[in-house]
Amino acid sequence: MSTASDVLTPAAQQLQDLTNITWTVPSLVLYLNMFFRTIINDKPESSTALDVVNLVSGAIQQQPPGRINILDVTYNMGPSGAQVRGDAIQTIKREKMDNLVPGWTSFPPSSTVLMAILDDQLPHQFFVFPPQPTPATNSVELLNSIIPTMAVDKTTPFPLDDSYIPAAIFYVVGMALSEETSIPNALTKGQSYIKMYLSAIGIKTVMEKKSAQAQGNEPPAQQGQ
């Protein structure tokens, strides 16, 4: 199992500070924990959990506490405690559902969920269609993003897939350099490492997108996006 050391030791090598004189291990651990909090926004699927949620009457439902984004609502799970995957659930955005089925929130109730509706402005809630009866008896399975376990020291297990280790190294080095004022060109070097982090997780910067559009390699952004 990989540990925080698999990030912090290569980071110290990149910083040419193997003995941790300029950047102590605790300071690098802080940057690593910043990485965990950042990547869950940049790449929500990097840290996930499946949860079974008991539904309540009506259309609007609540995400379990301690979760970040709702990535998907997957299956009907039956009465509370049954936790047996049943019919699949289609997940769509609220704007699309409003166009497809106007007045869907007032449809006759039914225990079996056909569709789950997500709204970007309600990150911790979701809707179900049809609405649930009173009393509600069904449960559904949610795929949620969760904040990774924070590092305490170099021995803490790395909580993400090992494929994220290079991105973590780039981020830690980038943040360390960006906040160092005594090293010439540290800020510029730090920004380069942050770009490497973004590239490693598949995110293009605004300038890279503009360059790709100018070269005809990427379609222009739609108005209003």
Image (spheres, rainbow, N blue to C red):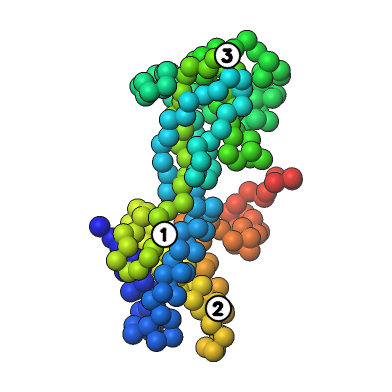
In 3D space, how far apart are the residues under numbered discs 2 and 1 (Cα atoms)?
21 Å
Mark in front: 2 vs 3: 3
Q: Is residue 91 left or right of residue 49?
A: right
In the rendered image, the residue lying farthest to the right is 223
Mark in front: 3 vs 1: 3
Amino acid type shown at disc 2: Glu
Mark in front: 2 vs 1: 1
Quadrant position of residue 60: top right
Of marks 2 and 1, which one's residue comes earlier in the chain?
1
Which residue is under mark 1? 150
In 3D space, how far apart are the residues under numbered discs 2 and 3 (Cα atoms)?
56 Å
Q: Where is residue 220 in the image (x, y as percent from the top left)?
A: 67, 50
Residue 195 in sight from this viewpoint: yes
Of marks 3 and 1, which one's residue comes earlier in the chain?
3
Residue at position x 56%, y 32% in the image: 62
Residue at disc 2, secondary structure? loop
In 3D space, how far apart are the residues under numbered discs 3 and 1 (Cα atoms)?
41 Å
Q: How crowded is mark 3: few (under 14 residues within 10 Å), some or many (20 or more)?
A: few
Residue at position x 36%, y 71% in the image: 8
Q: Is residue 153 left or right of residue 55?
A: left
Residue at disc 1, secondary structure? loop
Q: Position of residue 124 (x, y in %)?
A: 58, 39
In the rendered image, the residue lying farthest to the front is 135
Of marks 2 and 3, which one's residue comes earlier in the chain?
3
Amino acid type shown at disc 1: Met
Which residue is under mark 2? 179
Q: Which mark is residue 134?
A: 3
Q: Position of residue 100 (x, y in %)?
A: 66, 21
Residue at disc 3, secondary structure? loop
Q: Is residue 222 left or right of residue 34?
A: right
